Amino acid sequence: MQDAFVKIWRNADRYAVTGHSPMTWFITIARNSAIDRLRKRRPAEDVAALADTLAGDVATGEQSAIARSEAARIAVCMQELEPDKRGAVRGAYLEGRSYVELAAMYDVPLNTVRTWLRRSLIRLRECLSR
């Protein structure tokens, strides 16, 4: 919270009255600060390693089996994506990379990364619904 308040204090001159309340601006800064902090902390993980996380901290045997099954389905669907798009999805949603980082990594415009991620998530949803 302190980081968010410091950012708000230092950037108060950037607040523009646009019809939204100042609280909306505060909340956005606090949310983005929290996301940035989580991205710095989180180690890179693989889809298969997330099976236990999907089941929760206190998982029964059945919940663990279901989570492993879901992780396997996700891994199969991820393989259907093109390598660069698969890497972008992994980077954004498993490794916590920002869109800007992914754009630099793949040497493509920022909006291209956004399009890749949106279309990839649609394809993953379709694959998982089969």
Image (cartoon, helix red, strand yellow):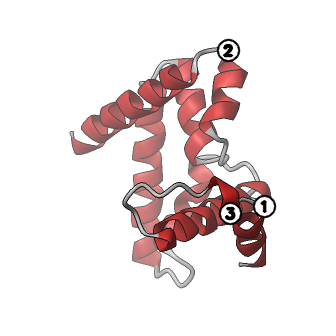
Q: Earlier in the sequence, mark 1 or mark 2?
A: 1
Q: Earlier in the sequence, mark 1 or mark 3?
A: 3
Location of residue 93 with respect to 13 vertically, above or below: above
**Of labels 1 and 3, the one closer to you:** 3
Q: Position of residue 79 (x, y in %)?
A: 48, 28
Q: Position of residue 1 (x, y in %)?
A: 71, 78
Is residue 77 at least partly visible in the picture? yes
Q: Which mark is residue 41?
A: 1
Q: Residue furthest left?
A: 130
**Of labels 1 and 2, the one closer to you:** 2
Q: Pointers 3 and 2 in contact (CB under 8 A)?
A: no
Q: Which residue is mark 3?
A: 12
Q: Which mark is residue 25?
A: none
Q: Residue at x 44, y 63 (%)?
A: 67
| Spatial CA span between label 3 and label 2 | 34 Å
* Amino acid carrying mark 3 in the image: Ala
Q: Residue furthest bottom?
A: 58
Lateral position of residue 72 relative to residue 45, left or right: left
Q: Which residue is mark 2?
A: 107
Q: Pointers 1 and 2 in contact (CB under 8 A)?
A: no
